[in-house]
Amino acid sequence: MQKKSKVGSWVFAILAAIGLMVALVNLFIDNMPKGEVQKVEGYKPWDKKTINLVAGLPLQDGGRIKPFSTFAGFKMLGYHGARSMKVKDDAGMVHKIKPTAWLMDTVFRPHLAIKMPTFRIDNSKVLEAIDVKQKGRRDRYSYEEIVEGREKLFQLAQSYEPIEKKKRDPEQQQTIDLAYNIRNFEALLGYFSYARIGVKLDGTGVDGAPDQRVDFSAVMSSAPGLMPELERMKSQEGKVPERLLSLLQQIEDGANYSKYGLFILPPADSSKKDWLTAGNAIMETMTLKIDQPDVAIKDIATTESAVRELANGEKAFREAMSTLIKRTSDRAKPSDIKFISLEVFYFKSDLFLRAMILFLIGSISSLAMWGLGQSRVSKLFYWVTLSSTVIAVALCVTAIVIRCIIMQRPPVGNLYDTVIFIGTTVVILSLVIEWISRNRFSIGIAPVLGTALIILARRYEVGDAGDHLDPLVAVLDSNYWLTTHVICITLGYTSGILAAMLSCGYILMRGLNLDGENKELRRSLTKAVYGCICLTVFLSLVGTVLGGIWANYSWGRFWGWDPKENGALMIVLWTLAILHARLGGIIKDWGLHLASVFTACVVAFSWWHVNFLGVGLHNYGFTAGKSTIWIFYCVMLLVLLFGFAVMLWEKYSADQKNLNPVENGELVKS
């Protein structure tokens, strides 16, 4: 066995450092606001007790009942591009605001929310086009900073919408997205306007005093007598008094302001599924279209009390909110709110972020483990790598189990599911290989793969900004087929990716002479890769057949040459070709590993890239991650070229050695 190459070790260390820097950029710099922390005059942070209470308020969104905190998290992610922001108060103290507190500010303290840096703008030309002052090419802005260009923004967005989405340039698409975000944010800002201002009764002021105001709930109580009287006036007198018209206009405006945003009122009739916004309840009561008006009136009165009690301090506000939450929970179906507390815990604990940090620690430790050879310190780093990786994967498994309980379905149903599932299972499979082979290589690569895939999941989550716990479309909503076909095909992706990554490690290790030509280690890795390829072809083939049966059941045909189906077939055919070539002696160790690296490209295309094509019954209709997939292809191509070059060099060196045995110190025995 030769000594390890010092040059190779330095090259590997530099590559690893670059990889870690990329990971850190994705973790921190990409989500941090540019420039100074924005000052919000009069800002006072919410009490933690208040935040924890409101976090559990159930509401309907995306076809399911979810906690206020989940709704807030994805709203903030869509607008802000992150799940936290920082602001300064009057004293210069910096406060970190999380989603629940941010949405509470938006709906309960809009005068503060309009000053917060809520909107992430990635292209300053969008603001330049609407005559808004820019801070930098990419930054975050408050509603107050953007509102001066609001009308022009909506005009531009309206002019861009007829353009087919694929043909829009980034500036046009972000203009449309910003316009939608501004409009939706305005709906949240004005949601509780009816509770804050009430209804003004024109002409009730005496001796110069302002006109009196009454609650919306009080006016709603008069609807059974008011609305028939209004119709009588129209038909008999042909005219409605100005004061009555003013009252009706205020009611309509208040209902419209709270017509969208928060569906927080369960239906009075348990047979109905759709929850109501405050605006729906107000308008349906006033138009006498609601079955149980007393329930709606009490609902609005409860929300009015909660909003107004905020002026009396957070303790009074919490008491009023507790009444609202209890009223909502008592009327909701028990099955709908069964896992509200669990979901609040899931997002608050952020187990995947904790796992990613542990994986990152394991990645750094694994580099130290390999760099220090067989020393005692190296063994210490081995145990650090192993323990951090095992704890991290345990956190991932816990998070996935919690998701399954909340969703009431298997762990894979959408693209986000598949990323975290593959990330977890690929690490588990690496640990199994390490347990079998004891070569310290698989344990070194496990945390690296875990880190990379969780970063990918977080990037997809930011780009998509959709609630990945929402129900699936009807054709996919089958726990049987999700458990059989989807898990099987996803495990095929897992083993294919692991085989490719093991081969990448093999190529770098052999090409940079990091193994000291340890033939036992090379043989062990080759066996592991071969086993992973076998597992890939088996799972992909079974999964593809099961998918065809499901397609025949759902769509009336077994096979339709859909891009996703073609991708699965590509994995089967490519891995079968590798195995036949290996068994037939056409490819040796180098050929197996080079072919295995290309397997990563085939798997990535089938799993991820086909979604960008925008066609087929399996089209998920998203664009997040386009740049990432091309970077991945380029990296795999570079590894292939490097491996091919090393293979040719080894062949050339071996030929030269055979041609000149004496020059190489080899005496021919007589």
Image: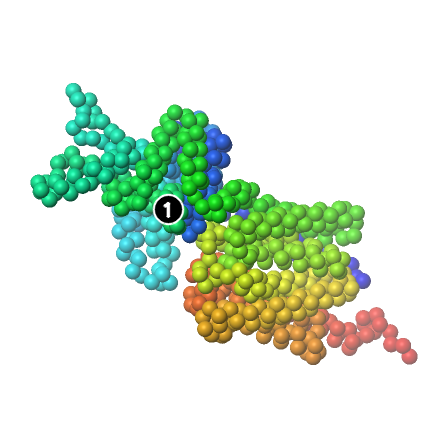
Q: Position of residue 24 (x, y in %)?
A: 56, 47
* 539 relative position to 83: left or right: right
Residue that appears at 50% across and 61% down:
478
Left or right of 246, for residue 270: right
What scheme was used to colour the molecule? rainbow
Placement of the N terminus among the 4 image quadrants: bottom right
In the displayed structure, 324 sits above or below 71; it is: above
Could you say which is closer to the camera, residue 101 or residue 80? 101
Residue 256 in view of the camera: no
Q: Residue furthest right?
A: 670
Judge whether residue 211 can be spotted in this image.
yes
Q: Tell me the quarter of the image containing the C terminus.
A: bottom right
Q: Return the x and y of residue 434 as percentages of the image width and height.
A: 72, 57
573 shown above or below 482:
below
Mark 1: amino acid: Asp
Q: Please give the residue where the numbered disc 1 appears in the rendered image.
A: 269
Mark 1: few/some/many CA within 10 Å (<14, 14-19, 20+): few
Front-most of residues 280 and 399 = 280
Give the image location of residue 353, x and y in percent. Answer: 57, 46
Q: Residue at x 48, y 45 (%)?
A: 334
Q: Nearer the viewer, residue 579 or 68?
A: 68
Which residue is outermost to the left?
237
Please state if 388 lies on the left or on the right of 493 as rendered: right
SS at circle 1: loop
Q: Position of residue 442 (x, y in %)?
A: 70, 58
Quarter occupied by residue 636: bottom right
